[in-house]
Amino acid sequence: MAEFEPQIVAFCCNWCTYAAADLAGTSRVHYPPNVTIVRVMCSSMVNPIYVLKAFEGGADGVLVAGCHHTDCHYIDGPVKCDATVDKLRKVLHVLGLEDERLRRELVAASEGVVFARIIKEMVEQLKKIGPSPFKVKTEALA
Amino acid sequence: MNLEDIIQETKTYYCLECGKCTSICPVARYDSSFSPRLMIENALLGFGDELLLSKELFSCLTCYTCQQECPSDIDFPIFVRKARSMAQDNGQHGVCAHSGQLQSLARLMTSPAIKQKRLEWLSKEYRVSENSDVLLWVGCAPYFAPIFEDIEFNALDITKASLKTLNLLGIEPRLLANEKCCGHDALWTGDIETFKKLAEYNAAQIKEAGVKKIVFSCPEGYRTFKLDYPNYVDLGCEVQHISEFLAEKIGENGMKFKEIKKKVTYQDPCRLGRHLGVYEAPRKVLKSIPGIELVEMKHSGLESICCGTSAFTNCDSYSNMLRAERLCEATETGAELLITACPKCQTHFRCAMTDKGKEHRSTSKIEIMDLANLVANAIE
């Protein structure tokens, strides 16, 4: 049986993390291809429903990444995003989802290497804990 | 299912076009574009798309106020529910409160592989038993607790109070570690497939547990189990709302209340009141507590006004105005405490009182408490 390849949905802020992912590419830093990046204007616009929908659609992990607290293009985006993710984490905990499946990171535009490292780490962790429990439903439907 | 079938099933063709539904509808009072009569007429005259594509379809509170006045006894809420499921089939998911998070959680819960951690709040002070005949339905409270923490509402307090009350009455109820959403919200937003899956799972769990009675602290769950589950699954046990359960126990040995000096008013949740006709039980419980003076609002019982949103569908400024009006009515009675018997009523009222971002924020301030909490405080 082929090794389990986790699918990650990454919500990346336009100004920092998306640029960091771009930098990782242009600098030829290798990272696993298991990630689907969704560009958002600010990490604070990530509504909990985006993350829930990603899990509904069969994502094994979701990354919400944006600027550092002092770098935000919109002043206090990361603060709002932190609050959203914290709340969502509590909800997903009740649902019995492992904490590792939802990750919140701060990656600046210059940190292409950091972005690659985070994706690598996340893929390794997800390989260890296995497929998302919500996948059972989606695979049965397909 | 097409619109013709829905018309036949709900006997909408009896409509006399009298417009009483629209004149009494709480939503139509604020939202002039919302009209139950027009929605029915669109369906009858063959303008199905007008009905199915309109945002109004998801604005209906399904509160059953309209049916009270309808001379033809048309079941408008069921008509809306069926029309919503048709809209869902056509890819119209409607506008849902909280961006549809709660509906999404219900869909996620249908996965057979999840192992929920829904009983982590259960501490040693509460007694539960694996062999009990009585099951306390926890429902969505563990999910509501984190979602609504910023409006200072912990739905688990209601569950805890219900459990404490049962314990004090000498009952050690059973709790299900992996119970799933009852499917109320999914059903009323028209997502029948999700509802069926949840109902089948829950019915199987309950049968396996072999309980004789399920007690609910949430009228929405109670309604779903009592009226909707029998259409899909067989439960094989009795269901009861906590207020009915308590009303039966009043006067029995061991049930004594200490005095609480308070003037209170009571909000009839639409699911408990008009859907199931339970008006007396909560009032009987309130009146049996010494010191409690119950004053009724301008609209109460059969005429009571909904809290403004149901099944977490469309929640807009009109819903907020509706809530503001209801809270005004509550404060006008001079009561210091508004008692509800539904966690969702409490969520919506608290939201209206704390939400700072909205134009039509309610300015009335009144303390809100669930019936179960009051009883848990009063019981000796």
Image: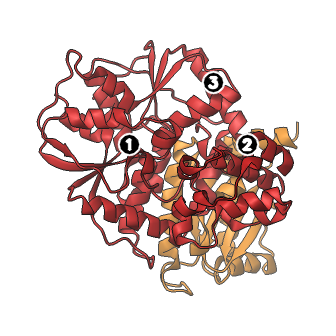
Badge count: 3
Judged from the image, the secondary structure of the residue bearing numbered disc 3 is helix
Task: Count neighbours of disc 3 (C-alpha within 10 A) and say few if under 14, some if 14 to 19, many if 20 or more.
Answer: many
On the image, the x and y values in percent for residue B193 come to 76, 40
Give the distance between the C-alpha atoms of the residues marked 3 and 1, in whole angstroms.
24 Å
What residue sits right under mark 3 in the picture?
A: B203
Q: Residue at x 26, y 63 (%)?
A: B332
Chain under label 3?
A: B
Judged from the image, the secondary structure of the residue bearing numbered disc 1 is loop
- Quarter of the image for residue B73 reads top right
Q: Earlier in the sequence, mark 2 or mark 1?
A: 2
The image quadrant where one finds the C terminus of chain B is top left
Chain in orange, by letter, is A
Q: Is residue A60 visible?
A: no
Q: Callout 2, which amino acid?
A: Thr
Q: Are marks 2 and 1 in contact (CB under 8 Å)?
A: no
Give the distance between the C-alpha atoms of the residues marked 2 and 3, in whole angstroms.
27 Å
On the image, the x and y values in percent for residue A34 come to 79, 58
Q: Earlier in the sequence, mark 2 or mark 3?
A: 2
Q: Callout 1, which amino acid?
A: Ala
Q: Which mark is residue B341?
A: 1
Q: Which mark is residue B196?
A: none
Task: Count neighbours of disc 1 (C-alpha within 10 A) and say few if under 14, some if 14 to 19, many if 20 or more.
Answer: many
- Nearest the viewer among A21 and B121 is B121
Residue A55 sits above or below residue B161 on the image: below
What residue sits right under mark 2 in the picture?
A: B10
Give chain B's shade.
red
Give the distance between the C-alpha atoms of the residues marked 2 and 1, in whole angstroms.
29 Å
Q: Is residue B116 left or right of residue B108?
A: left
- Quarter of the image for residue B162 reads top left
